Image (cartoon, helix red, strand yellow):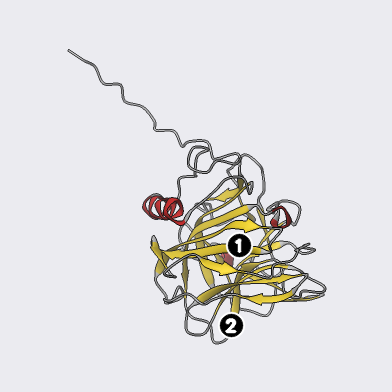
Amino acid sequence: MSRIKMGRVSTPAPSPGVIGWWPCFQANTDTSVVDVSGKSRNLSFGAGLTTAEAWAAANAFSSVDTTADDCGILARSAFDWDFNAGENFLLSCLINAAAPAATRTLFGNGYNSTSAQGLRFIVKSTGVCAPWFYESTGDLFLADTSGALADSTTKHLMFAWYDHDVASGTARYMIWFNGVRQYAVGVSASGLGTINPVDDFRIGGNKTGASAFQSMAASFSALQMYRSARSVDWDLERLDRLAVRLRRSPATPLTENEWPTA
């Protein structure tokens, strides 16, 4: 007679390309969002964010709708995606947010092509979202999603930046809600220059000036971010499979097999 051994199912090790992995399943007294990727890249709280505000939603980290720095902060040195080398980038999380009264920032580290270059992922008053880049060639406002992300329901969000040809200044991107593409095809971006961030990467808001900030009300969980070398040739069909997989198991990190780095 065969015997079946019962034991604990272990979580697979994340891909070496992981930037950070923040499940957000934490005690409501914690004063940071813990990175469990092994890289110790915890998110600190913005100056005005209290523990009660941060953990107001069960099993999630929350930012607050203010004109202050009430969001999660990943140190600039820890957000090591190299845009200028043409690296691929992927962000995945569960998010619950209502449409803001005016355009606000969901996450990002840029707001000005001259003084604060970087990525800004925005949400508009209609609930749609879009990636914006602030880079050496100027402000690049990319396409709105076809559907609303911010509608007061919990959705899985995946954003991928891929096929970045530095020499030609072109790249592609796609956004998925609950595993479904928000554009018919991979959207092309052109006229790309360089990005040299000076600010930290914020979850739930961004800087808007030298000492000015904004944040929007949103709750986040199962947050993961990854980078890989340009030589990893992603296509949309492969990314579709990742979007479905992450929608199904959002709190399980991508393995090296799923997210190769070179």
Q: Which residue is mark 1?
A: 171
| Secondary structure state at the residue bearing disc 1 | strand
Q: Mark 2 vs mark 1: which is more N-terminal?
A: 2
Instruction: For residue 237, say whether it is visible.
Output: yes
Q: Which residue is mark 2?
A: 103
Name the residue located 55 percent from the left edge and 57 percent from the top edge: 91
Point out residue 32 in the picture as x, y percentages from the top left corner.
64, 55
- Tell me where residue 180 sits by quadrant: bottom left
Closest to the camera, between mark 2 and mark 1, is 1
Q: Quadrant of the C terminus?
A: top right
As displayed, is residue 224 above or below residue 198?
above
- Tell me where residue 212 sits by quadrant: bottom right
As displayed, is residue 226 above or below residue 219?
above
Furthest toward the left, the residue is 1
- Tell me where residue 179 sits by quadrant: bottom left
Point out residue 47 in the picture as x, y percentages from the top left corner.
72, 67
Furthest toward the top, the residue is 1
Q: CA distance from mark 2 to mark 1?
A: 25 Å
